[in-house]
Amino acid sequence: CVWNSVYFTTFTALKQARGSPGRAETLLLGFGAGVFATCFNTPFDVVKSRMQAGVACPKPPKPSTLDRMLAIAREEGLLALWKGFAAKSLRMGVGGAVGILSFDIICDVIREFDHKPARSGS
């Protein structure tokens, strides 16, 4: 939810700022938006992954996601919330780039198909 919100907002803003980007630029904008969105999502992913794996994760009295984030930051330092960021940002950047470019291509095909006159049967 966090990643999608930041990704689509960022991509839309970048695309509007660039006008009508071509395919290569759309790929780059999608990659940049994916990496940027990952900056905001990684702390949530670190907590989720630790909870799923049963890895030592500080257990505050109230075990909400935010409480666990604060406990990790307190006990391991703030940067511990971005462990694995490099690999994840590359994966999400590439995924965002390919996904948005595929979406744009499919929309173009549908628009082109929609504008063709219907064939008359003879």
Image: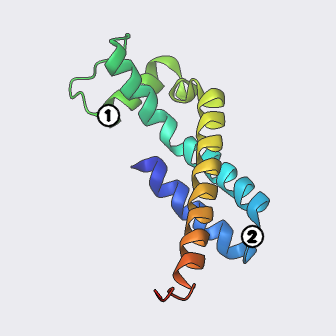
Between disc 1 and disc 2, whose residue precedes?
A: 2
Q: How many marks?
A: 2
The residue positioned 45% from the left and 18% from the top of the image is: 75
Is 23 positioned to the left or the right of 91 in the image? right
Q: Dot 1 corresponds to which residue?
A: 65
Q: Position of residue 37 (x, y in %)?
A: 56, 48
Q: How would you rate the neighbour count of disc 2 (Cα within 10 Å): few for under 14, some for 14-19, many for 20 or more?
A: some
Q: For residue 92, which quarter of the picture? A: top right
Picture coordinates of residue 90, whole percent (x, y): 66, 35
- Residue that badge 2 annotates: 21
At a point 59% along the width and 43% down the height, the residue shown is 95
Please, is residue 25 above or below residue 69 in the view? below
- Answer with the quarter of the image where residue 46 lies: top left
* Residue 36 x %, y %: 62, 48
The label shown at residue 92 is: none
Q: Work out whether residue 25 can be spotted.
A: yes
The amino acid pointed to by label 2 is Pro
Q: What secondary structure is found at the residue carrying circle 1?
A: helix
Label 2 SS: loop
Q: In the rendered view, would you say 108 is above or below 94?
A: below
Residue at 48 percent across and 48 percent down: it is 3
Viewer-nearest residue: 86 or 57? 86
